[in-house]
Image (tube, rainbow, N blue to C red):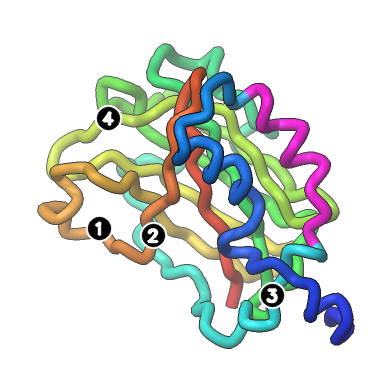
Amino acid sequence: MPLSGREQSHAIPIRRSLLQGWLAASATGISGISVGMFAPILRAQPIKRDITPSCGTDDEPTRSSTEGPFYSKQPPEKSDFRADADGDPVTLIGFVLTRDCQPVSGAIVDLWHANRDGEYDNRGFLLRGYQKTDAKGRYFFETIRPAEYGSRTPHYHVKLRNGDDRVLTTQLYFPGEARNERDFLFNPALLMDVQKASDGDIARFDFILS
Ligand SMILES: [Fe+2]
């Protein structure tokens, strides 16, 4: 449902939205912030007030990228990958939105990636799983940071399904990685916003479906 003019006039830009207070606190060096503290903030955030009138006028659909050779069909429904492998903790969060910035609820977000040694589990479903966005279009994975491998810079693989035949297959990247520019698949439009917390990184990416 489109936002009313009143809602829009009070809007906060969604692309700069959810973690703004948290990010600002981090940037100014306030200590004691952790991923664990972040979870209830995410759950409590009233998304509609975050939507901005400009959202949808300058946001292009998320770029697709190749699936690669390591996708496994029928992964389990899972959002916590931390028990799958040791590694530097990353909480991957964000929204799935339409081009006019409406949240997409019930979208399947399917994540798979390498471990800290740059290896995929091709026999089972370690570091593989999907979840559905909630009523406000949000997704949330607790996982680890993947390592580079071969010619590839560190990345997450994602497939999104929106309840119909449309599928977005893409990859997400970490800013500041030395190998990004040398990776032939790297696309700066697919960089996550990564911030450090006391118990790991928080990586944010909002998907815009076409
Ligand atoms: Fe990969």
Q: CA distance from mark 4 to mark 2?
A: 17 Å
For residue 190, the mark is 2
Q: Amino acid at mark 2?
A: Leu
Residue under the image location 52 percent in, 75 percent down? 61
User: Which comes sooner in the sequence, label 3 or label 2?
Assistant: 3
Q: Which residues are magenta?
A: 36-47
Tag 3: residue type? Answer: Thr
Which label lies toward us, 3 or 1?
A: 3
Q: Give coordinates of residue 12: x percent, y percent.
A: 69, 67
Q: CA distance from mark 3 to mark 1?
A: 29 Å
Which residue has dot 1 on it? 186
Q: In the figure, is residue 125 to the left or right of 52?
A: left
Q: Quadrant of the N terminus?
A: bottom right
Q: CA distance from mark 3 to mark 2?
A: 21 Å
Given residues 92 and 118, the one toward you in this image is 92
| Mark 1 closeness class: few <14, some 14–19, many ≥20 residues within 10 Å | many
- Give yes or no for residue 40 being in the magenta stretch: yes
> Would residue 73 be visible to someone looking at this image?
no
Residue 170 vs residue 134, the one in the foreground: 134
Confirm or reject: label 3 Cβ below 8 Å from ligand 1: no
Mark 2 residue CB less than 8 A from any atom of ligand 1: no
Secondary structure character of the magenta stretch overall = helix
Asked if labels 1 and 3 touch by Cβ distance under 8 angstroms, the answer is no
Which image quarter holds the C terminus?
Answer: bottom right
Work out whether mark 4 precedes mark 2 in sequence or the reverse, and give the earlier one.
4
- The residue under label 4 is which amino acid type? Ala
- How much space separates mark 4 and mark 1, taking CA atoms? 15 Å
